[in-house]
Image: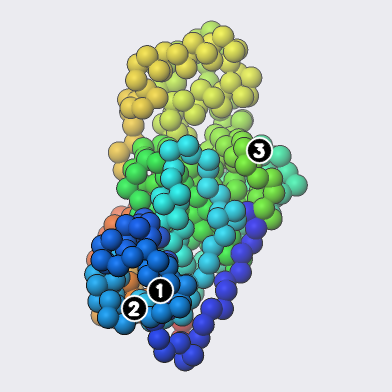
Amino acid sequence: MSNLKLSAGNKMSDLISFNPNRLKFARKRRGLTIVALSSALNITPKTLSNYENGKFEPKDLIDLIAEQLKFPKSFFFKDDIASLDETSVSFRSLSRMTASVRDSALCAAQIAIEFTTWINNKFRLPQPCIPDLNDFDPETAAVTLRDEWAIGELSINNMVHMLESKGVRVFSLSERTLDMDAFSFWIDDQPFVFLNTQKSVERSRFDAAHELGHLVLHKHGTPLGKEAETQAQKFASAFLMPGRSVAARIPHSPSITLNSIINLKSIWKVAASALVRRMYDLNFLSEWIYRNLVIEMSKSGYLKNEPNAIKQRETSKLLPMVFEALRKEGITKDDIAKDICVFSDEIDSLVFGLAIIGLSGKSNKQSGVASENSPKKYLRRVK
């Protein structure tokens, strides 16, 4: 996961005509092939390719292009959007993830960067506090990060809030599919994480910790592939379920049953399968007991739908504060969308569906859990 730099692109003052790069971007954002879009526009694929390559300008088709791709016309007359190199994003190798789904997600991430830039021009947000732990093994990295963040062995109440308080920009994946996994990247020394809200709360929390693992272990792009995924997975397990915390609470191996696992998992807010695997990795379970528990979970259907599941999904704490501050100034989500030349539903898909409404003053503090610093502490209007 290399640290990317924003490309300067064309300056608005220099760009007075249709931007072909944005046409290609919009097509990929909608998951369309050249053949599919050219058919919708009633032109040949070659003609569309010429438009995307900048050989010709689609002057008579701009309204139809905007309508088919669901972008405002103004979107196609702005400077280039910063590019994201696929190899620098922590995509997991899912056999069911198609190239179009991947490309669409990358484009959504680029819109999130534009949205973040807009917010950064208005507010001073929490600065990144994500150390480079590339030289550490996953277990040691998890312990080191917990020490640096002063959370010790406490369970983590809300992973999204924790990441945001440490300067990570967290967004929801716009793709409503299980075929797309969470992903993360660095750009201009700013870490981003994107979470799939179609998954269970427990899985989404683990995904957030997994992506945090990529951010601290793989900022410089090595290792890659399965090795990087294994490291991030081990980091997530160790970060969410500290070894000493697990050791202090589990019964002796012969006494461990699936029911006891179900009762214990709520301490760390993880899935039963994740806790069983962590106990096995810590040598608290023999291979025989571990395999039997996995078989029992599978037969009981717990690998897909387990009892005592968390109902309340973790969403952004930072964004509602930003939206509330903007609401008081009379700025709506439509205003933001207009400024970055997208429709508001594009923003909705990235911000967990949050609306610009008033905030409740209720506290979520619990005993025995790590509390994150409130982003409001850092939220300052840029003068």
Secondary structure beneath disc 1?
helix
Q: Judge depth for marks 1 and 3 and give the one in front.
A: 1
Q: Which quarter of the picture shows residue 7?
A: bottom right
Q: Judge depth for marks 3 and 2 and give the one in front.
A: 2
The amino acid on which the numbered mark 3 sits, given as a three-letter code, is Glu
- Circle nearer the N terminus (1, 2): 1
- Circle nearer the N terminus (1, 3): 1
The residue lying at 57 percent from left, 60 percent from top is 85
Q: Nearer the viewer, residue 193 or 100?
A: 100
The residue lying at 34 percent from left, 32 percent from top is 309
Which residue matches tag 1?
51
Is 83 left, or right, of 179 in this rendering?
Answer: right
Secondary structure beneath disc 2?
loop
Residue 215 place in picture, x, y as percent: 60, 52
Is 200 left, or right, of 367 in this rendering?
Answer: left
Q: Where residue 227 is drawn, which disc sits there?
A: 3
Secondary structure beneath disc 3?
helix
Q: Nearer the viewer, residue 188 or 91?
A: 91
Q: Is residue 70 visible?
A: no
Residue 210 place in picture, x, y as percent: 54, 43
Q: Is residue 58 visible?
A: yes
Image marks 1 and 2: residues in contact by CB distance under 8 Å: yes
Packing grade of label 3 (10 A; few <14, some 14-19, many >=20) is few
Rendered view: 150 above or below 24: above
Q: Nearer the viewer, residue 292 or 179?
A: 179
Which residue matches tag 2?
58
Q: CA distance from mark 3 to mark 2?
A: 46 Å
